[in-house]
Image: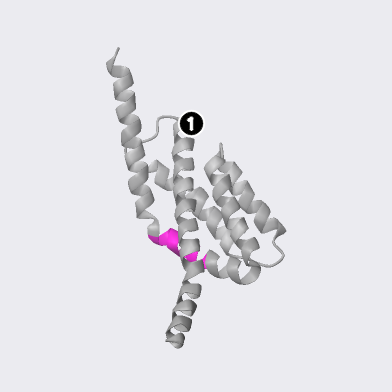
Amino acid sequence: MSSTPVAAAQRRAALQRAIALTADAFASETEQFGKQASTLFTAAQGNRGRSQIQQLLTIANNAQSVSEVLDFIKRQVGKDHESTWRPHFGPSLIEALDKGLRSRVRQLDPKPSGPFEEQQAHLALIRRFIGQLYANYEFYRAEPKKAGSDRNSGARR
């Protein structure tokens, strides 16, 4: 009987490792989304755009279900009058988070045992995906400023 909790803990740890490895594998995809977000949201909305990306990260980190994250994006797409979330960014992000990550959850080894564990694995991947997207957004958002400040500092010498 004492081996059951140990086996369960080992299985959870193995699943967490599989999730981490899967998250590392989508780094180039999240870089593209982050780069696209830095262009769309910074140019069109400045700090308000940054706030929307931060809100997405907060929603993802606190969501109890996958639909909470997807519904937030759908609301942003629906009320977007400045074309930052649509026509491509929002729908593409929904596709990547829903279908793209759901298929990756099915490929995890060990497989999630049951619908609840599958949902938790999907949420974990969404959190990592959006976390990476946000890091890339901040990186590419700051890039033009760094290039501009380097040029200005060189001119002063």
The residue closer to the viewer here, 135 or 80, is: 135
Residue 89 at x, y = what percent?
A: 57, 62
Q: Is residue 135 on the magenta stretch?
A: no
The residue closer to the viewer here, 89 or 104, is: 89
Residue 98 at x, y = what percent?
A: 52, 48
Q: How is the image coloured?
A: one colour
Write down the quadrant of residue 84 in the picture. Answer: bottom right
Q: Is residue 31 on the magenta stretch?
A: yes
Residue drawn at (72%, 65%) of the image: 81
Total numbered badges shown on the rendered structure:
1
Residue 46 at x, y = what percent?
A: 63, 67
Residue drawn at (27%, 17%) of the image: 3
- Mark 1 surroundings: few (<14), some (14-19) or many (≥20) residues within 10 A: few
Residue situated furthest left in the rendering: 3
Amino acid type of the residue tagged 1 in the rendering? Phe
Residue 47 at x, y = what percent?
A: 62, 63
Write down the quadrant of residue 154 in the picture. Answer: bottom left
Say what secondary structure mark 1 lies in.
helix
Image quadrant occupied by the C terminus: bottom left
Residue range in magenta is: 28-36
From what the image shows, is residue 62 above or below residue 36? above
Residue drawn at (33%, 20%) of the image: 5
Is residue 85 visible in the rendered structure shown here? no
Pointer 1 residue: 116
From what the image shows, is residue 40 above or below residue 65? below
Image quadrant occupied by the N terminus: top left
Is residue 75 visible in the rendered structure shown here? yes
In this rendering, position of residue 4 left or right of residue 46: left
Q: Main secondary structure of the magenta part?
A: helix
From what the image shows, is residue 60 above or below residue 155? above
